[in-house]
Image (cartoon, rainbow, N blue to C red):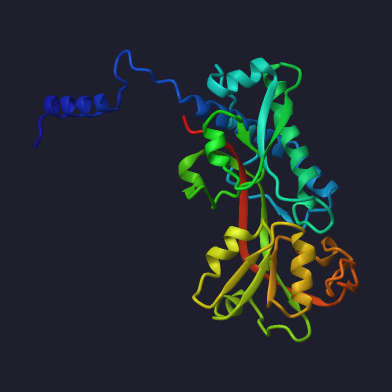
Amino acid sequence: MMNYRLRCLTIAFALNLWAPVSGADTTPPAGAHLVEALDAAWVRVLDKDIFRNIVTRHGLQDVVINISDCLPKPEVTHFPAQPAGTLKNILESKQVNVGVSAAGRLDDGATATRFTTMSDELLAAVFGELAAHYDIGSIAINYVTIRPPFPITSTLNSGSIDIVGLVNALGGETEDLRRRDSRRFTCTLTATRQVLWLKKEDGPQWQDINDALDDPNISLCVGPLSNQLSKSYFDGPGQKVKTEFYSDLDTCLAKLINGEVDAMASPFTHERFFPEKVDTTGDGKPDTAIAGLLRSIDTNIVAGTPLWVALD
């Protein structure tokens, strides 16, 4: 039996292993300050129902999902008391440089069109909360467009931008790097489920997502918001996924109606988000009405998007 004195010395030694070394810098990395501040601002946007009101105003309440990896509890989610690094620079300049990707024209034929304005309003709400907390009036949001081949990670980590906006899902990769490993990230701000759309008549007879996943010869047409996810899940030797980066809704819906693909993967849960007509003859004129032609299968797969901050 260890005597009392020896037991106390052992406990004291163990505790000392966890104590900070005298004079050591215990300040969190500069990027961590910005993530902490963005999380605190986001939680307040959530707590005040600003998020829900924005989503509803854009008619996306049955599309956009709140993944509660950060609960609406401001009392336990604090802003940094002494901002440093990028956060300090943003507060002093009263401007944040936000990187976003651009692929083609945003019109009714593109999936991203339905989300762009909503995402801008959410970001404005987050930086409104951040500016209010630090009492600096307002923070101007300067969008920086990053074009193909979309070197977003290297652009972020070079300091050319302060954050990446709501354009990169948490589970993906950029420049052959896993995003989770090559950047810092905040709470999930927006998320969408993935839905398979197929023809009611003359389409596959799948009843659920397992039927689709088990189809060895499935062919899918997808847009940029379903690209990496679809290619990762439907990666069998005979399974084919073609991504249309430009006017993806117009192109994929036309291919689906013409029987060139089995299904279209999309974040949309209702056909009201689709163009009324698409060009199925190739003459450049919308000629075929969508209403009533399609049915959907929920994949039970959800992709979430945070804000991204550079690694220190």
Residue 125 in view: yes
Quarter of the figure with residue 133:
top right
Give the camera-side residue of 199 and 50: 199
Name of the residue lying farthest toward the top: 23
Q: Position of residue 185 (x, y in %)?
A: 55, 39
Q: In the image, is residue 168 above or below residue 31? A: below
Residue at position x 52%, y 70% in the image: 235
Q: In the image, is residue 141 above or below residue 56? A: above
Give the camera-side residue of 158 and 28: 158
Residue at position x 58%, y 46% in the image: 69
Quarter of the figure with residue 303:
bottom right
Residue at position x 54%, y 81% in the image: 216
Q: In the image, is residue 194 above or below residue 13? A: below
Q: Position of residue 224 (x, y in %)?
A: 67, 56
Q: Position of residue 146 (x, y in %)?
A: 65, 40
Q: Position of residue 149 (x, y in %)?
A: 60, 48
Q: Would you say 175 lies left or right of 205 here?
A: left
Residue 49 in view: no
Quarter of the figure with residue 99:
top right
**Quadrant where the N terminus is found in the figure:** top left
| Image mark count | 0
